[in-house]
Amino acid sequence: MRLRSQAVENTVQVLLPLPLADAYDYRVPAELALVPGHFVVVPLGKREVIGVVWGAGTGEVPQAKLRDVVGVLPALPMAEAMRRFVDWVSAYTLMPRGAVLRMAMSAPSALEAPKTELVYRAAATPQSDDTALKLTAARRRVLEVTKEGPAMPVAELAHLAGVGTSVVKTMASVGLLEAVERVVRRAFPQPDGTREGPVLSPDQKAAADGLVDKVRAHAFSATLLDGVPGAGKTEVYFEAIAAAVAARRQVLVLLPEIALTAQWLKRFEDRFGAPPAAWHSGLTSLERRETWRAIAEGRVSVVVGARSALFLPFAELGLIVVDEEHDGSFKQDDGVIYNARDMAVVRARLASAPIVLASATPSLESVVNVQTGRYGEVQLPGRHGGHQLAALSAVDLRRDPPTRGRWLSPPVVDAMKATLAAGEQTLLFLNRRGYAPITLCRACGHGLECPQCSAWLVEHRFRRALVCHHCGHAEAPAQACKHCGAVDQFVACGPGVERLAEEAAELFPEARLELFTSDSLMNRVEAEAAVERMINGEIDILIGTQMAAKGHHFPNLTLVAVIDADLGLNGGDLRAAERTFQLLYQVAGRAGRDGRPGRALIQTHNPDHAVMQALVSGDRDRFVEVELADREAAAMPPYGRLASLIVSGPDPAAVDNVCAALARRAPHRDGVTVLGPSVAPMALLRGRHRRRFLLKTSRDIAVQPLLHAWLEQIGLPNSVRLQVDVDPYSFL
């Protein structure tokens, strides 16, 4: 409907993709007819910016102070469901609407008029006899080509006809050909939703049928697809994708790791005959523009991407799939802080589309949502084809410690020898990048720290650098200690994957080793190549971090060894046990996936810990039950609500002053607890001193109104930043 209300005297509200909470009123020139969602150019100060018409003007600004909308961009208007999604995310996360809108306008060039090109076809009008006399052999070949296909650019037409481009241009000038302007659009392959898929087991078929029914209902539903590693969850939700594509509706698949994309894409193309469109940070600006616009125009049926793909402008969204839904990578901790898994459920609801959350180790939040009836559930209790899960056992490092200066215990070394002798592959898993996490001076005990963060510098020996994994600061290894001046007295403490690779190479010099980390594989192409080498048997020992822990199918991998299973249990984090169990269960599931018996060995100093006991016994459900009982007793999520406040600034005194003001005005009522202020575990990050508050409420109390009422009483100096994290995942 046109926004020409006399009550607001031809004005509209325009929301700008800037960290602003409110839309601005603008006057609509008589020659423009605007509707909500139109992308428009408006003046802002001395510059012009692109914004979105959000609604009718408020009428609160005098006409004399209003500025005119400059123009409308030639792009489809932002759909109402998308605008509601922006509003919802903003309200839930307490982030400015403009900051959320910016994520939904991630390819600004896609809003501009698409590029055009001249294409040539045979002239529609008959030629005179005089013109006909000019039909040389070359010209006849050109006309023959134009009869057999659509209009095409001069270079392509000339190539197919075997003539020079001047021949084509001359034919156009004398009237034998006519030039037509055509919009340049990238052609996207179209997956075939009617293509026959693989034969499913009875359990898979029952699960797939349930998901297909939900897709065909064209209504919102949320379903947890719960299956052990290797159960064939991907093949099951592929059936739901096929149903959506066959119904000419669009599908969004969210994956947590770029390294997972390679095998997933191959499986998808094998199933549907064409690849999906991909959306991730590695796309060029041209690829982003073409993909964004094609999605908005409905020319792309399936998109696979990282969490940012959630904000793409789908024309007809019919299904969302969140694979590895438990994964912490779905949480964005910078800018607009949100959990893509949870926001995907909201996006599906606003689009009246079903959503599938798939995992072998579902998050406790999703488990409780199933128990309370908010989500449906389909289960795949066994591996596809009757294959058995890897036999998992704990290696007690108190009884079987590695030799001095080593990190692989004797049972792990023996298992690796047997695996190599059998011509099979090993995965050594250590969720710690670099060579060593700490570098100390033997003379004075001083450790090398990041100058901008409360963190140790991690040695990356292969690239000869000391790196902070929090802010990215890097420096060359020092020869002399800055504190005591001792020379060549630095010693590496603890293992990283590079040190593990060094040890494995010494123990097995004939084996082919490769690192599988974000440092060794810098982009998607390199990750795909490494996965392919592993599948082809070109690697004997793969040494990796969490990038190697989930989603991969390596047919000849039969041994997984977890080097430091206790690593994630330190620090007292609310989700430490849950995350550790999920990660180790997933990595153990990489072994024995193709019919060969698999083994998983977990090195631990605490084999009696509940997580280790649950892993060894294979009783995932018992672990979940105990963990949920502990959370419920403490009224912690998913039985309570949390919001984290981080106050930071370069001057610790200014930060503490703001914290004191916040503490004085903290809310006090039944069911509400405010903890803090306290120094954050990461007390200094990127040169900013950090303090934390934690707001805890019972499940029936919404934290957003409390936070609004609390924070609006506080004025912040320019140097101090206040960051709100509703439903925090990390507590650093």
Image (cartoon, helix red, strand yellow):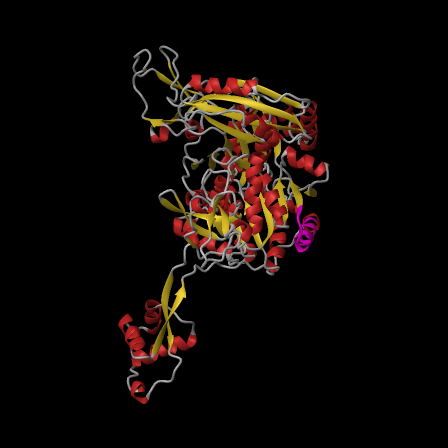
183 or 608, which is in the foreground? 183
| Horizontal side, residue 160 vs residue 541: left or right | left
Most common secondary structure along the magenta stretch: helix
Q: Where is residue 547 in the image (x, y as percent from the top left)?
A: 49, 37
Question: Measuring 66% from the left and 32% from the top, which residue is drawn there?
Answer: 618
Rendering coords of residue 464 (x, y %): 33, 28
Using the image as rendered, state which of residue 128 and residue 494 is in the foreground: 128
Residue 340 seen in the current view: no
| Residue 159 in the image: above or below residue 486 | below
What's drawn in magenta, residue-wise?
207-221
Q: Does the magenta stretch include residue 441?
A: no
**Residue at (44%, 42%) from the top-left corner?**
527
Q: Quadrant of residue 226?
A: top right
Question: Can residue 210 be found in the magenta stretch?
Answer: yes
Q: Position of residue 273 (x, y in %)?
A: 53, 58
How many numbered marks appear? 0
- Residue 647: x and y in percent read 49, 24
Q: Residue furthest bottom?
A: 129
Q: Tell me if residue 40 comes above or below residue 523 in the rendering.
A: below
Q: Taking 10 as reference, is 260 above or below it?
A: above
Residue 610: image quadrant is top right
Question: Would you say 601 lies left or right of 474 here?
Answer: right
Q: Is 371 on the left or on the right of 73, as rendered? A: right
